Image (tube, rainbow, N blue to C red):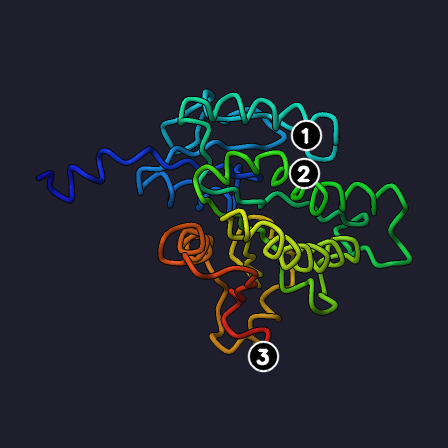
Amino acid sequence: MPSSLESRHNEPRRTLILTGASRGIGHATVKRFSSAGWRVITCSRHGFPENCPWEAGPEDHIQVDLADPSNTIDAIAEMRDRLKADGGRLNALVNNAAISPKLDGGARMGTLDTGVEDWQHVFQVNFFSSIMLARGLLEELEAAKGAVLNVTSIAGSRVHPFAGAAYATSKAALAALTREMAHDFGPRGVRVNAIAPGEIDTSILSPGTEKIVEQIPLRRLGTPEEVAKIIYVLCTETGSYVNGAEIHINGGQHV
């Protein structure tokens, strides 16, 4: 009788597709899943950076402009082709890519400052690409009884001092989309959840964030690694009966 270790070795390799992998939460998520033995296919607007810490390299990186629907459709076809090596199975899709344009000097863009083109650009990247990817990869997700994880934001539930109106409303829409997807994908055996990070210590923090920290019950910023841990839980067996949830990761800031 094979040992439990041998049984695990005989299981199909688990695969994650992650958008917005080049920094911050995405970067930490790649490292978390890679350390657990997952194959990670990363997606971003840029080519594979030579200084990245994971071993997969450019053969598991797809350069895609999620602001371009046609380019996104082409990327989905490439993803499906690459997944054939794993039996056409996808265990997790993490929609992490997002943009938040600023005014000159880094000022917040409100509803009166945001042009129509900016609204459309932000929603294409932050919202529409998520459903495009999930629908385009549904067959592979269904084959693995996989999970979709959408990254929303605390800005989706309140006016934020730094996040702009287009970013905030796209994240609110993504939270609603998560519920709709959980309802529709669930009968296919695919779970769909979201995480809503608060102030996370990354390179894109806005000046003045230290004032927000004073209002957070834990009195500190979160780390990308803390967010990545929750993403991992929601994409693995530990979260096997969690569907349609949005998990706050903000040190209590939402209370």
Residue placed at 89% from the left, 54% from the top?
A: 113
Packing grade of label 3 (10 A; few <14, some 14-19, many >=20) is few
> Disc 3 marks which residue?
255
> Disc 1 marks which residue?
72
| Viewer-closest of 7 and 215 | 7
SS at mark 1?
helix
Q: Earlier in the sequence, mark 2 or mark 1?
A: 1
| Viewer-closest of 40 and 133 | 133
Name the quadrant of the C terminus: bottom right
SS at mark 2?
helix
Q: In x, y percent, where is residue 76?
A: 61, 28
**Which amino acid type corresponds to the residue marked 3 in the rendered image?**
Val
Task: State if disc 3 and disc 2 touch (CB < 8 Å).
Answer: no
**Image quadrant of residue 159?**
bottom right
> Disc 2 marks which residue?
132
Q: Closer to the camera: disc 2 or disc 3?
A: 2
